[in-house]
Amino acid sequence: MSEIKFSNEEKEALVHKVKDYFIEELKQEIGQFDVEFLLDFFSKELGSYYYNRGLYDARAIFESKIESIDDAIYAIEKETNT
């Protein structure tokens, strides 16, 4: 898995969400640098778990669609004498 990178706009949105969380839930303010450091830590140390879960979920959807297509193909199969 390659390194998780976000655009500047995405990173700014994430920083804002973390700052809001700290204020609302923890009643603490956290600086921009600290939030970016925390996000980098989560991306590096935990990102692969979320990434793999996303792949697992995508695979389940794909397998479900393939099964549906397979059922549709069997449904249009014609009878033969053999």
Image: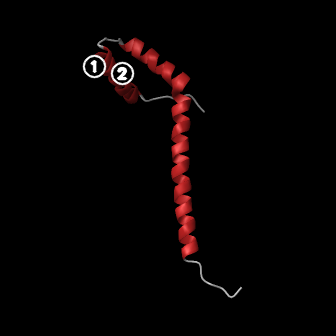
57, 2: nearer the viewer = 57
* Amino acid type for the residue under numbered disc 1: Glu
Nearer the observer, 38 or 72: 72
Residue at 31% across, 11% down:
28
Is 58 placed left or right of 16 in the picture? right
Disc sitting over residue 24 in the figure: 1
Colour treatment of the image: secondary structure
Which residue does the numbered mark 2 point to in the structure image?
18
What's the mark number on residue 62?
A: none
Residue for point 29% across, 16% down: 23
Report how far apart the C-alphas of labels 2 and 1 lie in the structure: 10 Å
Name above or below for residue 37 compared with residue 53: above
- Give residue 46's position: percent from left, percent from top: 53, 25
Disc nearer the start of the sequence (2/1): 2
Could you say whether the residue bearing mark 2 is in a helix, strand or loop? helix
Along the viewing direction, whichever of 32 and 25 lies nearer the viewer: 25
The residue at the point 51 percent across, 33 percent down is 50
Label 1, secondary structure: give it. helix
Q: Nearer the viewer, residue 69 or 32?
A: 69
